[in-house]
Image: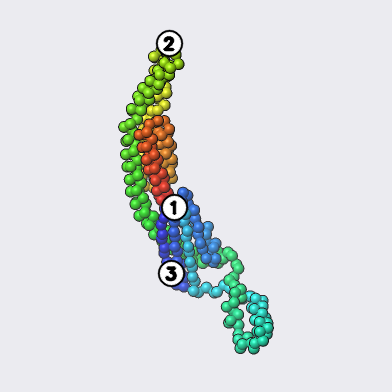
Amino acid sequence: MTGFGSATLEEGPRRVAVEVRTLNHRYLKLNLKLPRTLAGLESELEPVVRKQVRRGALTAMIRYRDDSAQPSFQIDVAAARAYRDQISKLWEALGLKEPGWHDRVEPLLALPGVVRADEEEDLSPGIPDETRSLVRRALGEALEALVASRAEEGGNTVSVLLAHAKNLEGHIAIVAARAPEIPREQRDRIHQRVQTLISEIDPKIEIAEADLVRELCVLVDKTDVAEELNRLQSHLERYRSILGGSGEAGRKLDFLIQEMLRETNTIGSKANDPTVAHAVVDMKCEVERMKEQVQNLE
């Protein structure tokens, strides 16, 4: 489910800004982007996210600034000296008089590689408790905004899913109205075909009518889709119940929709009938739309 939330908190010299975004995903996939100085907090923040969000590809961007902190960088004297030597050689090779900035260091500091960030990777032991608390609270507020955003989208998605369910029921009704006629028509057609074949092969052949009817009933019973229709209707009732309830719905609906598709395919394979075949195509289209929309629910 897509969504967005943000929050910014300040306490004295400290400032934390958090942006949280989610995209559709079958499971929960986390991507926490922290500044290097807060990298050690990742394991503490993941449970905070998982408590609020259970499904979706979530990206959390956390920015942190502490105006009271000492800058953490290093000056590479060797790199500055190398730059200075190469610049002197350039002026000499061009036959030019070296400019008057040769005794200043400010231009050298702007060159790549002269000033480097401190390479220390894990500063978590030095993170004050006040900073940890501020980051957690900012993340919590951003997640609350995200959940509210997703809830609004979820309400719209539920309306769409219920509309698909209603359309599906319309197609099921077409199949249910046609289904009782299929076995009888199949029986009569096969019976007529058998009689025609026998007369073509040898009119003297006699087959007991009772035996023929029994075999026909076995064949025709394989075209009966009443059980599949009943199960499909039961799945739809459960589907609506889940959408109308609270708590997680996405994974439950994933399973139900798989079962709906299974029953729909079975109906299509059993009922050798043009009307049912056309209705089954429409049913599968609706089920596929439901399957796609369910990815937007947690």
* Element on which disc 2 rests: loop
The one of 42 and 295 positioned closer to us in this rendering: 295
Question: For residue 204, which numbered disc appears in the image?
Answer: 2
Packing grade of label 3 (10 A; few <14, some 14-19, many >=20) is: some
Residue 263 in sight here: no
* Mark 3–mark 1 distance (CA, rounded to whole Å): 32 Å
Q: Identify the residue under disc 1.
A: 24
First in residue order: circle 3 vs circle 1: 3
Q: Is residue 26 above or below residue 140?
A: above
The crowd level at tag 1 (other Cα within 10 Å; few <14, some 14-19, many 20+) is: many
Q: Is residue 107 above or below residue 211?
A: below
Residue at left offset 48%, top offset 62%: 61
Q: Amino acid at mark 3?
A: Glu
- Residue 210 in the image: state x and y as whole percent: 39, 14
Q: Residue under circle 3? A: 10
- Mark 2 and mark 1: span between their CA atoms? 70 Å
> Could you say whether the residue bearing mark 3 is in a helix, strand or loop?
strand
